[in-house]
Image: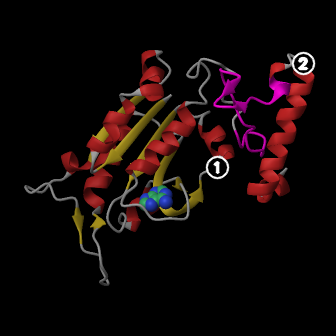
Amino acid sequence: MRIDFITVLPDIVSPVLQTGMMKRAVDKGLCEYSVYDLHDFSQLKTQHIDDTPYGGGAGMVLSPDPLFRCIEHCKSLHTYDEIIFLTPDGEQLTQTLANTLSLSKNLLLISGRYKGIDQRVRDTFVTKEISIGDYVLTGGELPSLIVADAIIRLIPGVISDSESSLSDSFQDNLLDAPYYTKPATYRDMEVPSVLLSGNHKLIEEWKFQQSLGKTKLRRPDLLEKK
Ligand code: ADE
């Protein structure tokens, strides 16, 4: 899979791609990234990439020209399954959406800043708009990395235990059961005895009941989806 990023702040995006799971995916030959700095596509001497909004109002809007030129450059190199704009008014990111996107070959993620981007960019190129939640961040860089993380970890082979991403919270609309590791007793706190029993059927039943109980308490909306 290839994931390309367009941003005015590559210094937020690039270091994350060079660390941890995101880097491992590249080292294993399972993922490739390119990060494009929008300033490089400005035709202005000042390299300005934003301007004040027509109709007035606070904040700045990313101008159409650098974005058009940058996206056209990316499209000349690759065919994208989706061109995604990160925005609080987009479709909410869910595990189901991450699962679907993880089947893509090439994705282009566009981060906005300030008040957003010129609507003509959205109308011309963007095929999907994603929000990571009902709150407003300063820009789309962190959301784009969150979307990328949620997708890349699902690519077979990226996470060593092939089962582990399938058993995540949300994969079956249930929150995850609690986890424990050694030692069995720590500061007088015991690991639930069923987990030490070696009885896999009992353990699975215990995990399911824990998941169900936690989901009922914290996210009853997920049970309605089930
Ligand atoms: N940009 C700013 N806030 C955002 C959000 N909540 N989701 C996606 N992109 C954003």
For the point 36% across and 37% down, which residue is it? 76
* Residue 103 image-quadrant placement: top right
Residue 37 painted magenta: no
Considering every residue shown, the one lying at the far left of the view is: 45
Estimate the x, y position of residue 124 in percent, counting from the top left. Answer: 43, 58
Q: Is residue 217 above or below residue 10?
A: below
- The answer for how far apart the CA atoms under marks 1 and 2 are is 34 Å
Residue 166 in sight: no
Residue 172 painted magenta: yes
Mark 1: which amino acid? Thr
Quick one: SS at disc 1?
Answer: loop
Which color mode does the image show? Answer: secondary structure
Quick one: SS at disc 2?
Answer: loop
For the point 7% across and 55% down, which residue is it? 45
| Nearer the observer, 109 or 188 | 188
Region of the chain picked out in magenta, as a range = 169-195
Mark 1 C-beta to ligand 1 under 8 Å: no
| Nearer the observer, 131 or 83 | 131
Identify residue for label 1: 94
Identify residue for label 2: 199
Report if the CB atoms under discs 1 and 2 are less than 8 Å apart: no
For the point 9% across and 57% down, which residue is it? 46
Q: Relative to residue 121, is residue 82 drawn left or right?
A: right
Mark 2: which amino acid? Asn
Q: Relative to residue 74, is residue 44 drawn left or right?
A: left
